Every structure is written in structure tokens, then in C-alpha cells.
Image: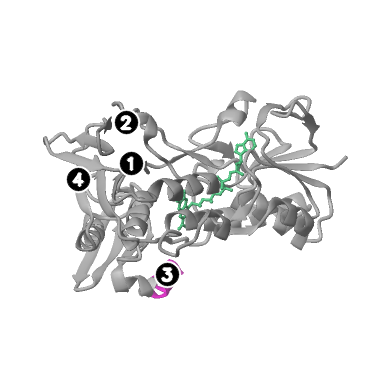
Amino acid sequence: MNRLVIIGTGLAGYGLAKELRKRQDKRPITLISSDDGASYSKPMLSSALAQNKDAAALVMASAEQMMAQLEAEIITHTQVEQLDTAARTLQLSSGQSIVYHTLVLAVGANPIQLPLQGSGAAEVMQVNSLADYARWRTRLQGVERVMVIGPGLIGCEFANDLLKVGKQVSLIGPDPWPISALIPEAAGRAVQQRLAEAGATWHLETFNGAIEKSAQGFVTELKNGQVVEGDLVLSAVGLRPNIALAQAAGLAVNRGIVTDAYLQTSDPHIYALGDCAEVEGRNLPYVQPLMVAGRALAATLSGEATAVVYPLMPVAIKTSLHPVVTLPVGKMEGRWALSQGEDGVLGRFFDQQERLQGFVLTGSNAALKGQLLKEMEERAA
Ligand code: FAD
């Protein structure tokens, strides 16, 4: 049978199934998820407190509703434990095994586990799923002081969300400035200043990697001797593509599951999509790339081989106290041309040939996203 099996019911897995049905592709589809299969928008996890939404309110459709909508079989609360590429079979945690004709790995990314020391290390929280968010909300009840380890994109979003519901927030990390992996210093400092004005305290370049339990909650002594206390600790130090299943099955992996421009892995019957995939050398763990790739893969699976071609994809950082939009440039050589006004930073990045390659907009400048994208398209033409 021409059965398509998709492992993962996140935005990538469900997105692909929806695209296939939009194309009137009627093949049998089975989706398998280790979670409850609820359809939700993961980016909401770091902005839902301020919107006063609990986990149930983030659910857009239950697994049962998705089954009806997609006319697909959805197996929930089940881990795929093994993939046998020769027999084209999956071994499930339920003991069942499933045969596929075509397999799509949409298994997402896992939070990076810091090698934390100290008596409180095991109680440090991470939020990367609806179930995590439900626990996070429960644990926050009655809590005033929260330590956030990791002042990157996701850490700053969680800090913003916590500040908006009146928590005291300490941001701690080895980073030289906030969101330093994506934006230049002036832009990071603008975010730092606005969050500080809203009550956040920043401890950059000074984390010593230990969280101890104390009578009141948790405590960490920083490299500079300062002591920071909190009632709850959140680790938000980034995500790593989930490559374990693919790697154990002998598929080519690097940072992510290696695919070509058609999302095909080193096995011609297996594709990878979303946060777990490294498409032509790039792992892009955001919603827009997985949607663009999902549309291309749906076309390919329906018989029109379609390479994924990414448009310019700016990243919006949901620090609503001081929003940021950036078209990141990674480690490209070049220079930033920055201007700083009362309410934010506007920066353009030029490569060594003086071509506009990226930008950053903070505060009210975030509204200039369309203008900057147009500028980039015109200069590229
Ligand atoms: P996931 O949503 O992680 O889904 C993975 C699925 O695989 C799950 O259903 C899981 O149960 C299943 N699975 C994994 N392994 C197995 C197995 N062995 N067996 C069975 N099932 C398995 N992106 C943006 O573009 N904008 C934002 O503002 C933004 N904000 C974010 C905020 C937070 C807090 C986080 C964590 C991410 C954010 N992102 C944002 C990133 C974005 O959410 C992800 O790129 C996207 O949700 C990834 O979807 P996915 O389907 O690839 O993975």
C-alpha cells in the first residue's frame, strides 16, 4: 500500500498533511506522535502568559479533530523507537510495528541540556511543548522571582512574558549581550534596556553553571561573586535537532537530519522536515521555513518534484516591550551600518562587496520590515 507515515504532529507534520490534502492527494496517511497530538502554534509558548492563556486555550484542534479534518490515522502518546530502513518498518513503544511506503521525519528539536551543577539542577524547567507549558503555568502560581538562564531569542521572549504578568525576572548567561547569536550589540542592548526598565535584572558573561537549592527556592553564585536568587529557574539555552532515530537507523546526519533541496534524506523513501531537518546544509528552526518546505514536499510527494526555494525570511522576536525583527546574517564577513533613535535601532548589514545582506529593526522600527525587505529585493534585482 502507498502509505505515507509522518512522525511528528507539530507544525511541520500537520502542515505537510494539510498541504497534501489541499492538493487532493488522497493517499492513506498515518501520523505518529509521542505527545497527545493536539494541534497548536508552538511560538505561543513564550507569549501566552501575558495573554492569560492556559495550555487548553492554546489548542487549536485535538487529535480527534485533526483525524477528521485530514482524513488520516493519528497515533498519539506513542514513541517511534526504531526505524528499519531495509524492511521499511517502524517499531513503536506500544509494541506495534508499522510498515511505510514513504516516511517523513518531522520530529522537531529538543532543548539543549546544560551540564548544570548543584543541588537545584534537576528542578530547572524547560518549555518546549504544550505539556511543558501546562507544568510551567502551574509551577508559576504564587511565584514572584524567576531566573531565566539563556538570554537568547527564546529566553528574552519568556522574560518579556514573565515581566508582563508582574514577575521579577533575572536573566543569566555567558552571552556578551542579549540575543547575541542573531543581532548586533546595539540592538541587543536596546532590548536589554527596555526589559531592565520593566524590572528585569541582567547578569551577562558571568554564569558559573551551578544552581543550588535554598530555603526560599534556588540560588546561584555568579563568577563575579554576586548571588542571584529565584523561586523558579527556567533554562532557555536553545534547541538541538532531534536526530537520534535517524542516526540510529544509519541515515546521514550532521547538526540536523541531512536532506537535499527536495527534503530527501540519504534514504530515497525517507524525507525530513521542520526543526529536525538540515536542508542543503541549513537548519532553520522557524515556522516560515517549515511552511515553505512543507509546500515543496507536498508537491514532490504528489508527483511534481519541487526543490525548496526559500524567500527572504525575517525572524520576529516577540519581546513586545521592545520588539525585534531581523534578517540574520550568521557569521558573514561585513559591517553593520546602525542608527539609534529614541525608540529603537535600525541597522543594515553590508557584506565585503557592499551588498545589503541583512537587517535588524527594534522598537517602533520593527514596523519598517516591509520597507527593508523591498530594499533588499530591489538591490538584489
Ligand atoms: P515540533 O513542534 O517540536 O514537533 C515535533 C513532533 O515530533 C512532536 O509531535 C513530537 O511528539 C514528535 N516526536 C519526536 N520524536 C518522536 C518519536 N521518536 N516518536 C514519535 N513522535 C515523536 N518560530 C518562529 O518562526 N517564530 C516564533 O516566534 C517562534 N517562537 C518560538 C517560541 C518557543 C518557546 C519555541 C520553543 C519555538 C519557537 N519558534 C518560533 C520555533 C517554532 O516553534 C518551531 O520551528 C516549530 O514549531 C517546529 O515545528 P516541528 O513540527 O518541526 O517540531
Of the numbered discs 2 and 4, the one sitting upstream in the chain is 2
The image quadrant of residue 326 is bottom left
Residue mark closest to the camera, 2 vs 3: 2
Q: Is residue 321 above or below residue 207?
A: below
Q: Which residue reaches farthest left?
A: 225
In front: mark 3 or mark 4?
4
Q: Would you say the magenta stretch is mainly helix, strand or loop?
A: helix
Residue receiving disc 4: 203
Give the labeled residue for mark 1: 233
Q: How crowded is mark 1: few (under 14 residues within 10 Å), some or many (20 or more)?
A: many
Q: Nearer the viewer, mark 3 or mark 1?
A: 1
Q: Could you say where residue 156 lies in the image, as x and y percent from the top left?
A: 33, 53
Residue at figure coordinates x 71%, y 58% from the top left: 18
Q: Residue type at mark 3?
A: Leu
**Magenta segment includes 377:** yes
> Across the whole image, how many numbered discs are drawn on residues?
4
Residue that badge 3 annotates? 373
- Residue at mark 3 to residue at mark 4: CA–CA distance: 34 Å
Q: Name the residue under label 2.
A: 120
How far apart are the two marked residues, 2 and 3, measured between alpha carbons? 45 Å
Q: Give the range drawn in magenta.
A: 370-381
Label 2 residue SS: loop
